[in-house]
Amino acid sequence: MSKRDGRSISHEAMEEIRIRAVQRVEAGESPEVVIQALGFSRGRIYEWLARYREGGLEALRAKPVPGRTPKLDGKALDWLYRTITMSSPEQFKFEFALWTRAMVRTLIRQQFGVALSEVSVGRLLRKLGLSPQRPLVRAYQRDPELVSDWITNEFPRIRAEAKAVDAEIFFADEAQVRSDYHSGTTWAPTGQTPIVKGTGARFKVNLISAISPKGQLRFMCTEGNVTADVFIEFLKRLINGREKPVFLIVDGHPVHRSAKVKAFVEKTKGSLRLFRLPSYSPDLNPDEHVWAHLKHHKMGRSIIKGPDQMKKIAVGFLRSLQKMPDLVRAFFRHPSTRYVIS
């Protein structure tokens, strides 16, 4: 498909295209998918995103806010974004394993012959939608080959088999939420660490949930540990009343591999099948984002006064999430779980 030439489109039409494209990306769509659908070159979307993140929607208007000509064009910004998000510094002979502003500054100078200050590099990275973040730690036992095989071969096979028998795919996971967990920040005088007052007693609630790429969410609370009997009870609830078979993907927890669970699955005569993710690969499970959302956006910002209140908050949050299928579907658009819907 040939690329469109913006010069043949009116200023007003281009303004509308720019704004709608950026809004779609901000809503969670892939920049490359958006720009490909519009028929423009890939570098264009990163030019527009950079302008938007610096000056808001006004910067996308037909008469954009004037300024100096950028030193890096859309093609360069596209390359830089893909390099930082998809490559390791070690591939460019850097000794440090994490992208820093100084390292990106050196990379830009080597690749494009453009000299920028570290402050300018930081500003540029933020325009591209990047921010300094604490990296996730992967277990050293994790087998990259098994992960790759799961993404490219095993899961596509499961998906094809599910389609052949008209089965629904769900991902399930367990989590424990504690009353003494807090997330986020709070304003306080500089140099004086704030104190969040709460009860000295500690409570916990154990949860099981399962989500589907269509935005469905099923969950169950238990005050005790998740045993084989508890997990089987959840499985019964998951398949109860369903006309279609369920393909459930879980991790390698001993409960999932127990003889009791295997016997129960066999008794369903095909109504339920279990599949296991590669070992030490929780990032491949979209259901992990349910717990992250619960902990960071609800439980971690609440004062817990007792176990009943804690359970009520957790259940209320999950019931609200059941009514937001768009948000549940968004958990499948994370870079590490996008393989499910690609």
Image (cartoon, rainbow, N blue to C red):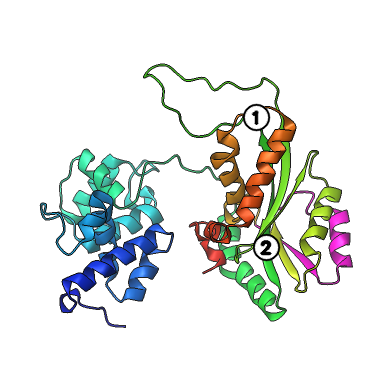
Within the image, what quadrant is residue 1 found in?
A: bottom left
Examine the rendering and report whether any part of residue 140 can be seen.
no
Is 259 a magenta residue?
yes
Q: Which residues are magenta?
A: 251-277
Residue 26 sits in quarter: bottom left
Residue at the image position 60 percent from the left and 37 percent from the top? 299
Q: Is 268 on the left-hand or right-hand side of 114?
A: right
Q: Which residue is mark 2?
A: 170
Q: Amino acid at mark 2?
A: Phe
Residue 19: percent from the left, percent from the top? Answer: 29, 63
Q: Is residue 290 left or right of residue 33?
A: right
Question: Which disc number belongs to residue 304?
Answer: 1
Point out the residue furthest to the bottom here: 1
**Residue 275, magenta (yes or no):** yes
Given residues 156 and 334, the one toward you in this image is 334
Q: Position of residue 189 (x, y in %)?
A: 38, 19
How busy is the neighbourhood of tag 2: few (under 14 within 10 Å), some, or many (20 plus)? many
- Residue 146 is marked as none
